[in-house]
Image (cartoon, grey):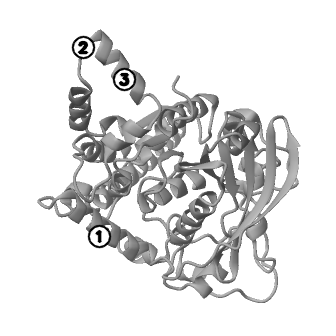
Amino acid sequence: MLINLTVSRYFAAICFFICCLFLLYCEQTVQAADQSANITRLSEILPDKPWPERRKEILRRWLELLGPFPEKVLPLESKLEQVEQKDGLTRYHVSFQTEADDRVTGWLLVPDAAKKKPTPAIICIHSTTWGSGKDATIGLSGRRPIDPPRDPQVGAAYGLTLAQHGFVTLSIDLLTDGERIDPRHRVMDTRPFYQKHPEWSIVGKNTWDIMRSVDFLQTLDFVDHGQIGCTGWSLGGHTALFAAAFDERITATVSNGGVLDWWRQTAAWSREPSSWAPWRKGIDEPTSSKKLERRFGFKTNSGPYVYIKSFRPYIDDPSRQIPIDFDSLMALVAPRPLLIISTEHEFYRHRFFPKAQQTLEIYANWKDADGLPSVLKARQERRGYAETLEYYGTQHLMKPEKIERQLGEFGAGDCFSWFSFPGGHSFPGVARRMTFAWFDRWLGRTLY
């Protein structure tokens, strides 16, 4: 009898625990649905207005969150120093001015072939590292400067592999990493930035630094100034997307593993206000939790990293309507080529496909008009247009005027695409091959 009573109590406790988990799941599901419902979709922003007016409004809303870019564009005062020449590549250490008291640092890799004629260039943005920054992007180190380069299958050294593929690549340090860590602060610590720029955001700052990177590349005579791409993984992936949205000089973009969704969590887009405070005297203890230590194998002394400080009210009040979403950010890139790569699970977590649908609608229905970039002109200028005219002219007896008219009606649907892969957050070989193919196709380095 006693045994049966004990078993019954044990069974009841298990049932109660399962019910609690189910209720918690339901609550989180409802919260997620509510949060998703309180976000302004692309289709809801001035739906009856022409695209130029809608685009202007989208830019305004994003800049309200990110903060304004600097009004004054300073001279670059760039410095370029050759470091080594090896395996068909010349490596330069570069730096250039982005603000009055701030310089971007980077590695410039130049293939030997680029010295013969202007060559397309790609800005390569590193993921979150613990001090390596640009070094990880060209395979000089792992996440920390003391770590060996990461397994090639992880694919972190895309600045190197794209240069080996024939592109000029510029791999820069983002602020708070690499050479741009304030010696008084941790790596990835944005507190001094917000002390200096209380109305800006580190996302806006990173975007501005990529725009200045385009300025720098356009001063180099061995770079094709009209063929500049941008790519990155993880932190670099979402930075590449923001940069492409705000700088129309970026011709083609691949964003791998970048965040594409608003998460109303303290550790996501905007941490608690104490993370904005000026630096205190002394050195903080390592920030690593046991969970992070298990994941990475060492304690990390980094952060706090606050992406967009002004997003905090939307975390504190989940019912508050977010005025913009990432479908609008992707649409700002139109009609320029944009490839989004991520894991299957990340696409699910980011609710990607409803966003992709709305973005694709902008691309597919693109019509060249005054004040809008011409997709037809871009197709005519890229490698392969002559082959199009020759094939359809000889095989189908079509006149060039008809081919031109049909391509003009085609829109830009093929300029936006996405690709997913199984597994974890990484940049594996299959994603790298897609990246190479995308840049080959749209930057015109090769036809096949």
Q: Find the distance from the CA under tag 2 to the CA under tag 1.
A: 60 Å
| Residue denoted by label 2 | 397
Q: Residue type at mark 3?
A: Thr
Q: Find the distance from the CA under tag 3 to the CA under tag 2.
A: 12 Å
| Residue denoted by label 3 | 388
Q: What kind of element bears circle 2?
A: loop
Q: Earlier in the sequence, mark 3 or mark 2?
A: 3
Q: What kind of element bears circle 1?
A: loop
Q: What residue is rendered at 73% in x and 43% in y?
A: 115
Numbered disc in front, either 3 or 1:
3
**Image quarter for residue 51?**
bottom left
- Report the disc number at residue 259: none
Q: Residue type at mark 2?
A: Leu
| Residue denoted by label 1 | 319
Residue 138, percent across and down? 75, 46
| Residue in front for this viewpoint, 275 or 202 | 202
Residue 394, percent across and down? 31, 12
